[in-house]
Image (tube, grey):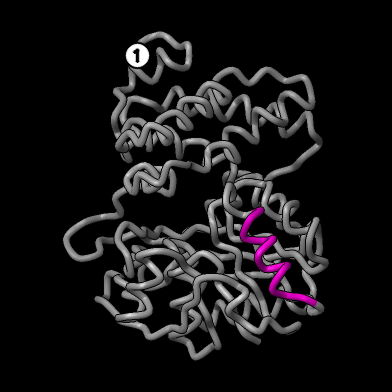
């Protein structure tokens, strides 16, 4: 079984590197300066234990590969980039049917994949990683690099899900095949609503706890209205405990989460449409007001388009933008 990692950034790079180090057949799909750096000097994986330089095969597009039915595509692009990535995989697959595992935050990517492929798997990840320079991925949890649970979408844990989870465990990750992966993804969505707060005001989230509570209250109301269940905080905490232990890489902690990193790289886009925007969508579909999540979605999109640096707003500026009073 070959793992084709489409999107070799923070998440895809860390997962692909771990599988490669464990002896599995891995190829990365990357782009631009990151691809050139990997081709020229390998992927640099930095962890609390040191740096490894890995000569993982890398290409720029799926069309450069001869995809086979036994391939597993680990889709690790941002959700906003997933439709184009999936179309590229579909075009390259021709008459074969690879399995697709969606490693994105939020709820949308597996549905996008299921429009194109029969065998689609969702995942719930807790991987404190970063990708801020070409050719380099940093993984901050040690000794276990983090948590990657997988399950067939929309439901089930078949033999392939079990095999993928077993391979991930061999690579050092905590991983289980879960028949109810959407419940775990919904719980992770609730946690990820704070990503845009970190991006706007800084990674420590200082002064925004009440805003985070308001965002979550809207989201829970939307999930209930949509008939969607989620894993409770106690069960999630039990799953994470002892498995995700962020430490320093070199002389610094993880700088910020995925949305923070999007602003830091000045990428021009951000995943908020599929986090806070998912809440806004559910609210509009089911008649639940979501003014805070919708406002934060718009604000984060504007910060990304304007290529504003992370932490460019004070908590009070954020509150005003969301229609809240000062702390």
Q: Pointer 1: residues within 10 angstroms few (<14), some, or many (20+)?
A: few
Q: Is residue 242 visible?
A: no
Residue in front for this viewpoint, 148 or 264: 264
* Residue at figure coordinates x 44%, y 28% from the top left: 302
- Does the magenta segment cover residue 55? no
Q: Which residues are magenta?
A: 83-94
- Does the magenta segment cover residue 93? yes
Task: Classify residue 245 as left or right of residue 4.
Answer: left
Work out whether 123 lies above or below 201. Answer: below
Q: Quadrant of the N terminus?
A: bottom right
Residue in front for this viewpoint, 209 or 271: 271
* Residue at figure coordinates x 25%, y 61% from the top left: 248
* Residue at figure coordinates x 37%, y 48% from the top left: 261
Work out whether 145 lies above or below 283. Answer: below
Quick one: which residue is furthest to the bottom in this view?
A: 23
Task: Classify residue 287 as left or right of residue 42.
Answer: right
Q: Quadrant of the C terminus?
A: top left
Work out whether 16 lies above or below 198. Answer: below
User: Magenta region, mostly helix, strand or loop?
Assistant: helix
Residue in front for this viewpoint, 182 or 110: 110
* Residue at figure coordinates x 35%, y 69% from the top left: 142
What percent of the width, then of the height, locates residue 169?
55, 78
Task: Classify residue 9 as left or right of residue 70.
Answer: left
What percent of the width, then of the height, locates residue 60?
50, 71
Q: Is residue 211 visible?
A: yes
Quarter holding residue 178: bottom right
What percent of the width, then of the height, locates residue 98?
73, 75
Task: Classify residue 223 as left or right of residue 307.
Answer: right
Which residue carries the number 1 mark?
A: 327
Quick one: which residue is furthest to the left in this view?
A: 251
């Amino acid at each position: 079984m070959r793992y084709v990692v489409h999107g070799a950034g923070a998440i895809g790079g860390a997962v692909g590197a771990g599988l490669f180090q464990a002896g599995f057949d891995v190829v990365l799909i990357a782009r631009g300066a990151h691809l050139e750096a990997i081709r020229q000097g390998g992927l640099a994986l930095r962890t609390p234990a040191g740096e490894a330089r890995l000569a993982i095969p890398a290409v720029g597009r799926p069309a450069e590969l001869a995809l086979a039915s036994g391939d597993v595509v680990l889709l690790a692009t941002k959700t906003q980039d997933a439709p184009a990535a999936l179309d590229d995989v579909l075009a390259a697959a021709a008459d074969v049917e690879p399995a697709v595992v969606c490693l994105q935050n939020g709820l949308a990517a597996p549905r996008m994949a299921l429009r194109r492929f029969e065998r689609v798997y969702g995942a719930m990840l807790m991987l404190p990683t970063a990708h801020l320079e070409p050719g380099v991925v940093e993984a901050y949890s040690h000794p276990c690099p983090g948590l990657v649970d997988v399950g067939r979408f929309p439901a089930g844990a078949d033999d392939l899900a079990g095999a993928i989870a077993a391979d991930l465990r061999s690579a050092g990750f905590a991983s289980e095949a879960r028949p109810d992966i959407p419940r775990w993804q919904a719980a992770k969505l609730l946690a990820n609503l704070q990503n845009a707060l970190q991006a706007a005001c800084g990674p420590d989230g200082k002064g925004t706890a009440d805003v985070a509570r308001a965002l979550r209250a809207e989201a829970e109301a939307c999930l209930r209205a949509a008939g969607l269940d989620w894993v409770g905080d106690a069960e999630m905490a039990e799953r994470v405990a002892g498995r995700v232990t962020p430490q320093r890489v070199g002389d610094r902690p993880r700088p910020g989460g995925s949305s923070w990193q999007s602003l830091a790289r000045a990428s021009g886009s951000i995943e908020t449409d599929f986090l806070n925007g998912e809440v806004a969508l559910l609210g509009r579909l089911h008649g639940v007001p979501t003014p805070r999540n919708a406002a934060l979605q718009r604000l984060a999109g504007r910060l990304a388009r304007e290529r504003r640096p992370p932490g460019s707003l004070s908590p009070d500026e954020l509150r005003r933008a969301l229609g809240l009073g000062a702390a």
